[in-house]
Image (cartoon, grey):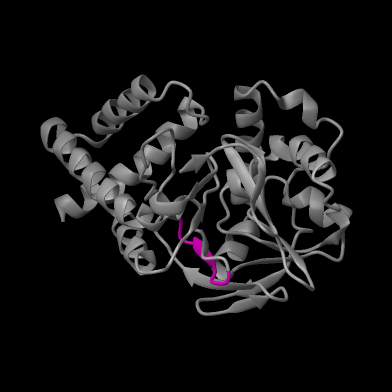
Amino acid sequence: MRNDQPGQVAPGLWCLGRRESNVYLLQGTRETMLISGGTSYILPDVLEQLASFGLEPGSISKCLILHAHFDHVGIIPYFKRTYLHMDIYALQRGWDILKMDKAVATINEYSRLTAEQMHLAERLQDYDLNWGQDISGTTIREGDTIDLGGRTVRIIETPGHSSCSLTAYVPEIKALFPSDGGGIPFDQEIIPSGNSNFTLYQQSLHKLVDLETDFICADHYGTVSGEEARGYIRESIRSAAEYRRLVEKVYRREQDREKTVAHLVKLILDTRPDYFLPEAILTGVTRQMVRHIAGEMDS
């Protein structure tokens, strides 16, 4: 079952944000963690939801970055600058990216573009949301666990969507937080998102397939629960293989990477007109995937 609305997912687990951009609040008996950072423009929604659900933002002591793309770190600068005690966790590769001037400029620019696309830019004028070199935290790696008290957050490195992608798994409630590395549950489909390296993306999905999951907590378009959650990663593997075959088919026909990108972007825009990414960003994402798949075909 899919649910794209904010609210309580399970005891001590809350989905916050908007339909197209989600973050999660996970409560343990000792500490509370914000999982993922969403797009910058969801901050007013998140603050309102915390208040309406009776959750105190100052009680959040930890935040986990699942990967360092602009639409997954957007509200973190506000929380870190407002609540100095908050510890931010990311893979070393994630911190490396977030210390690059070019990457930070891209995060801030794409955050602005997406807020404008959603007609929500004006609501952010009173908040300090730009990334900068003042944001730092703790490095984590494959196999690490973060104990919140009664809830253990297990770290699984799952590169492919990005070079810094990780998945969090909470065994006590069988909740999986794969970010875009698990495929995006848009409407009734699963959108593959092997942006940086499609082969690694497919391999990472296989790392997750045997985990017991009652909840898939996605960063876009909400949660998947119950029987669908238990088969979600297997379906995501199938969807990824199907999309790869499509890319290969179009590239064989076009024999040109940019023409392949243009064909695929048009297909996406025609079939998913209400998808949240602006066309310019969608084109860049598709170009990354085509570059990798076509490169492997040409080698």
Q: In which quarter of the image is residue 70?
A: top right
Horizontal side, residue 293 vs residue 21: left or right: left
Return the x and y of residue 35 as percentages of the image width and height: 65, 57
Name the quarter where the N terminus is drawn. Answer: top left
Look at 30% across and 50% down and name the residue there: 235
Is residue 7 located in the magenta-colored stretch of the structure?
Answer: no
> Magenta residues, as a range?
162-172
Look at 28% across and 58% down and name the residue there: 199
Return the x and y of residue 134 as percentages of the image width and height: 79, 58
Give the residue furthest to the left.
253
Q: Looking at this view, is 63 or 252 the one in front? A: 63
Horizontal side, residue 251 vs residue 233: left or right: left
Q: Looking at this view, is 96 or 230 the one in front? A: 230
How many numbered discs, if any?
A: 0
Name the quarter where the C terminus is drawn. Answer: bottom left
Is residue 166 located in the magenta-colored stretch of the structure?
Answer: yes
Return the x and y of residue 2 as percentages of the image width and height: 48, 41
Q: Looking at this view, is 169 or 285 the one in front? A: 169
Residue 101 at least partly seen: yes
Look at 35% across and 61% down and name the residue there: 205
Return the x and y of residue 227 as percentages of the image width and height: 40, 52
Q: In which quarter of the image is residue 107?
A: top right
Residue 196 at least partly seen: no
Horizontal side, residue 8 vs residue 158: left or right: right
Horizontal side, residue 66 vs residue 291: left or right: right
Look at 58% across and 54% down and name the residue there: 68
